[in-house]
Amino acid sequence: MARKIGFIVGSLRADSYNKKIAKQFAALLPEGFEAVFIEIGNLPLYNEDLDAAGKVPAEWTAFRETVKTVDGVFFFTPEYNRSMPAAMKNALDVGSLPYGESVWPKKPGLVVSSSAGSVGGFGANHHLRQTLVCLDVPVLQQPEAYIGNVSGLLDEEGKIVERTVEFFQKIVDEYMVFFHKLAD
């Protein structure tokens, strides 16, 4: 049976660079691993008043159940105002609450940030990592995945250029070593 890696993309834009990067990472997973793209754009904002019997939004329940089925999680985030997008933070909150019922603990994580600028989403990457520490998600530390000047990494057809795919493969390979140390 294939191990499942959840793919969560913080950008909701249809033609998102992060979605393109996530699809490339999914294609690089080794045999025996399956990418599961987990939708976050449809999640109502977390409100504790709704997290009670008979009130829980169906989207929250579906999201939580999906995250429970994955063995690890790749997070792909753009940088908005030096942090992660609200949709990403909301997904983390929905999955971690109510208290004592978090779906996140012990799932090996990978954080990939990208931006049109040269810093590669550094602020978003680190804010996301900070939150994942609180959620007990161990995160691959090296190689770091800050993807800067992302529009320059695409060819004329909108595909990621080969030298960048090679870098992505290195990240996936290191994640697999990390994953097996924690999950096996």
Image: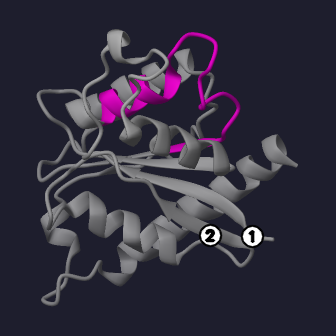
Residue 142 visible (yes or no) = no
Viewer-closest of 93 and 158: 93
Viewer-closest of 89 and 131: 89
Q: For residue 172, what is the image quadrant?
A: bottom right
Q: Return the x and y of residue 159 as percentages of the image width and height.
A: 26, 82
Please name the amino acid that badge 2 sits on: Glu
Please name the amino acid that badge 1 sits on: Ala
- How busy is the neighbourhood of tag 2: few (under 14 within 10 Å), some, or many (20 plus)? some
Question: Residue 34: which numbered mark, if any?
Answer: 2
Q: Is residue 107 magenta?
A: yes
* Residue positioned 38% across, 63% down in the render: 22
Question: Residue 108: which numbered mark, if any?
Answer: none
Q: Are marks 2 and 1 in contact (CB under 8 Å)?
A: yes
Q: Is residue 100 left or right of residue 111?
A: right
* 86 in relation to 46, above or below: below
- How busy is the neighbourhood of tag 1: few (under 14 within 10 Å), some, or many (20 plus)? few
Q: Return the x and y of residue 150 as percentages of the image width and height.
A: 19, 61
Secondary structure of the residue carrying tag 2 is: strand
* 42 in relation to 53, above or below: below
Mark 2 to mark 1: distance in Å?
6 Å
Viewer-closest of 100 and 8: 100
Secondary structure of the residue carrying tag 1 is: loop
* Residue positioned 62% across, 69% down in the render: 34
Q: Is residue 102 magenta?
A: yes
* Residue positioned 80% across, 52% down in the render: 180
Find the residue positioned furthest to the front.
54
Q: Which residues are magenta?
A: 88-110
- Residue position for label 1: 2
